[in-house]
Structures are given as C-alpha cells and as structure tokens.
Amino acid sequence: MSKLFKIQATWLEGTQVESETREFKMLLDKPKEENGTNLGPKPSEVTLQALGGCLIFAYLYAANRLEVAIDGLKVNIEGEMVPGGWMDENNGKRTGFKNVHFEVEVKTNHSREEIEKVHNLALKASPMYDNFINPIKVTDSFLII
C-alpha cells in the first residue's frame, strides 16, 4: 500500500518561500550572496538535510534489526552544484547536484564488520538514498488563476 506525501510551497516576497507539510512550515530563502535575504535554507540544502535525516532513521532501523548498539550518529553531507549548470556523460545539460558525498560517523563498541552490515542495510532501507541514486518519474502541470 502506497502513502502519498503532500507539500505546498508559496512565494511570499522577494526570494522567500513558505513550504508547508502537515502542520509544519519552513521558510526557504537564498543567501545574501545570491541576492536573497538569508532567512532560511535553500531548497538544495533542505534536500541534503532530508537525505541526512533519512540516513539516520535508516541506520537506527538497521542497527535495531541487526541488534547492534549505537551510542551516537552524525551524517556529514556535501553536494556540489555548478552555477549555470553542467554537462553530464551524455552531453545533457544538468542544473541539479553534480555529485553528493556523505560520511556517517557512528559511535559504537561494535566491530567495523558489524557496522558495515548496518550501513549496507541502512542504504537499502533509506527512501531518500534511493531517490538520490535512482531516477524518479516526475510529472508536472500548471494552472493560470
């Protein structure tokens, strides 16, 4: 059974956008060096935050399933974007992330081999990781109101 997630993004003014899902609101903005007001993160930064949070949830799930005790987790992520876009291996112009690298810091008394099993299961369990590594069917439309 699938689950449908919904958000609504509304332009407020200038470079400020309010994004809402369920009862949660988030202000998105651009940094001052991109002519923004720096009142919130950029959408690309929120995308990486979502990946980091999802990886932590997936690690906790995997550790519990494999009966591995974890005392602390931190995910450090870097995503490279090229202003104006970049060309992929098929000479297609891309405007999204060119590459993303993450490192998971695990505080535990378990062995490297045990944590590697947790890591591999976590990657299989993480929906956001799956979104980053596999194409997604996206459809669109617009309304004039």
Image (cartoon, rainbow, N blue to C red):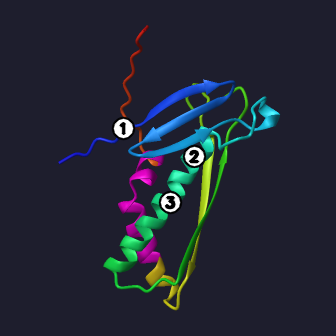
Q: CA distance from mark 2 to mark 1?
A: 16 Å
What kind of residue is marked 2? Val
Asked if one can make out residue 87 in the rendered structure from this viewpoint, the answer is no
Extreme residue in the right direction: 33
Q: Name the image quarter holding residue 122.
A: bottom left
Residue 71 on image: x %, y %: 52, 84
Which residue is identified by label 3?
A: 53
What kind of residue is marked 3? Gly
- As for residue 115 lying within the magenta part, the answer is no
Foreground mark, 1 or 3? 1
- In percent of the image, x 42 and y 42: which residue is there? 21
Which residue is identified by label 2?
A: 46
Numbered label tally: 3
Nearest to N terminus: mark 1 or mark 3: 1
66 displayed left or right of 104 = left
Q: Are marks 2 and 3 in contact (CB under 8 Å)?
A: no
Mark 3: secondary structure: helix
